[in-house]
Image: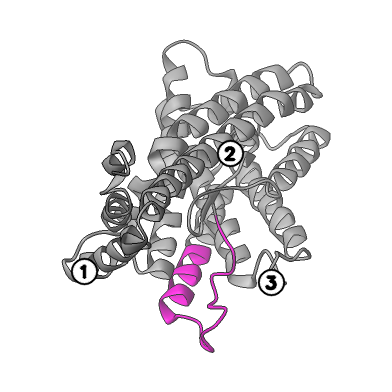
Amino acid sequence: MIITPALAARIRPAIDIRIVAVVSLTAAVAVGLAAIWIAAWRGGWSADYRLLGLLVVLGATASHFPVELTPKFKTNTATAVHFAILLLFSPPIAITAVGVSVLAGNGTLALRRNHLGQRRRGIYDTIFNVAQTMIATGVAATVLYSLAGSKGPAVFLIGPDIWGIPAAAAIAYVTTTLLVSIVVGIETARRPWHVFLATQRIDIPAEAALYLIGFVAAVLAVSRPWAPLVMVIPTAVVYLSTKRAVLLYEQTIAAVEAMADLVDKRDRYTAEHSRRVASNAAMIAPAMGLSREDIATIRLAARVHDLGKIALPDA
């Protein structure tokens, strides 16, 4: 999960102090968690740094292919890479490597600009994305190694201890999604819980598939260091299917609204009628204390409230 574009307000002259506070706190927790793991780890420190470097590059590359689920809430396929890193390497190395990968991805994105000429990543975006991913990895490692009691790479867990792997995946997902939801909620004046729920229909299946891909890639990489390159194929499939699902949802709404416009155009006295009703409904709904998701549903319902007229004869 990532938050983008800039967390800093692009129009307002000052940055929301709440954003500064949340980003600063998130960064402090990430550094503290990494330091605790470095001090507490009693397992091995050896690692295949060529494999680690490959995974870091793959994770950074994945940052350049996001899918927007809701305004300012995006996901990408780096989840599979980060989970593979967690399973293959000791927690201190994994937390650091994941942070470096996200930093590299966001840093290179900062060199690119969107269609408005704005940088695709700002300083607060980058700090938050690095920190929240490190926290998710650290918390997942805590769950994984607490349950398994292992002193080596988690990918070697077998028998009764293997259930710690899906538990770690679940806690990593919940941690990163909640952290992103909090910041997006502040940025968009929405309740974090509503932001969280609005993404789950598409996000949970995609993320579950990515964690599974990361697990399989980690198992294969133990004997075949080049295996992570193969996981690019199923990861690309997940990316394309997620993007297609979001696009299908948007196109469905656009098609329904186009039908509503067709009804309005049949009678010059009711031209733009459904648009006006939708606009009025969208202004009244917030005053009733409804959530953004409910407001969107009401606005769409208002747009199509006369859709049944499309079957009536002109006479």
Residue to which mark 1 is pinned: 284
Q: Which of pointers 1 and 3 indicates the residue nearer the eye?
A: 1
Q: Residue placed at 18% from the left, 66% from the top?
A: 289
Q: Earlier in the sequence, mark 1 or mark 3?
A: 3
Q: Is residue 222 left or right of residue 40?
A: right
**Mark 1 and mark 3 residues within 8 Å of each other at the beta carbon:** no
For label 2, the crowd category at 10 Å Cα-Cα, with few meaning under 14, some 14 to 19 and many 20 or more, is some
For the residue marked with disc 1, what is the amino acid? Ile
Give the CA separation, mark 3 to mark 2: 23 Å
- In this view of the protein, which residue sits in the foreground, 228 or 269? 269
| Precedes in sequence: disc 1 or disc 2 | 2
Q: Position of residue 73 (x, y in %)?
A: 49, 54
Q: Compare marks 3 and 2 and give the one earlier in the sequence.
A: 3
Q: Can you tell which quarter of the image residue 142 is in?
A: top left
The region drawn magenta spans 3-28
Identify the image's colour scheme: rainbow, by chain, secondary structure or one colour.
one colour
Q: Secondary structure at mark 3?
A: loop
Q: Which residue lies under the disc numbered 2?
A: 243
Q: CA distance from mark 1 to mark 3?
A: 33 Å
At a point 59% along the width and 19% down the height, the residue shown is: 156
Q: Is residue 298 above or below residue 307?
A: below
Q: Which residue does the numbered mark 3 point to in the structure image?
A: 118
Above or below, 46 relative to 159: below
Q: Residue furthest top?
A: 159
Q: Is 7 drawn above or below residue 167 in the view shown? A: below
Considering every residue shown, the one lying at the far left of the view is 288
